[in-house]
Amino acid sequence: MMNSTYVEQKSSTQKGSIKRGVSIIDFILRLIAIGATLGSAIAMGTTNESLPFFTQFIRFRAKYDDLPTLRFFVAASAIASGYLMLSLPLSILHIIRSSARMTRVILIILDTIMLASLTAGSSAAASIVYLAHKGNAKANWFAFCQQYNSFCDRISGSMIGSFIAIPLFIILILLSALVLSRR
């Protein structure tokens, strides 16, 4: 009888430590995702380039907000970054109190919404970046990256952070689901 009680306590302690370990990984992944999404939003939001036209007084200018899709990308990345910052206290709560279930369910739902939003913004922006680099002769859209090299390099680079954050959100959702499935 005493032996079975010891085994149950040991099993319960192991489950608690596994949940705590997963919660620590969750917290670290959220910090990395904050850096990725915030970096993407800042890099895209500060992108512009001017090219002289005949004289130095007349210039052509390319800015991220000239294209609504890139504005949507900045908004989605900034919202995801803000959400991740606001979710850090819940992540810390899960480290301290690994038995919290309702907050994990809330995080799964909100993480899924943020994943969908970030994926939509990143995918839409990726299509515009592709058109900027390659153009589309059939639609009579010319590749303007031949003229605006710095602008295109920067918008392409800003996409990297969001495409790092998307798999991180997937992992966060799976980790929370894993902890909820273990009783």
Image (cartoon, rainbow, N blue to C red):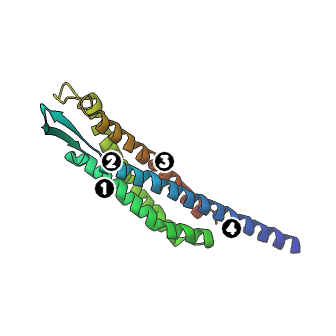
In the image, residue 58 sits, relative to residue 87, either above or below, namely: above
Binning the other alpha carbons within 10 Å of mark 1 as few (below 14), some (14 to 19) or many (20 upward) gives some
Q: Position of residue 112 (x, y in %)?
A: 43, 57
Q: Amino acid at mark 3?
A: Pro
Q: Determine which quarter of the picture holds residue 17.
A: bottom right
In the image, residue 54 sits, relative to residue 64, either above or below, namely: above
Q: Quadrant of the C terminus?
A: bottom right
Compare marks 3 and 1 and give the one earlier in the sequence. 1
Compare marks 3 and 2 and give the one earlier in the sequence. 2
Q: Which residue is mark 3?
A: 167
Q: Amino acid at mark 2?
A: Met
Mark 3 to mark 1 CA distance (whole Å)? 19 Å
Binning the other alpha carbons within 10 Å of mark 2 as few (below 14), some (14 to 19) or many (20 upward) gives many
Binning the other alpha carbons within 10 Å of mark 3 as few (below 14), some (14 to 19) or many (20 upward) gives some
Q: Which residue is mark 2?
A: 44
Mark 3 or mark 2, which is nearer to you?
2
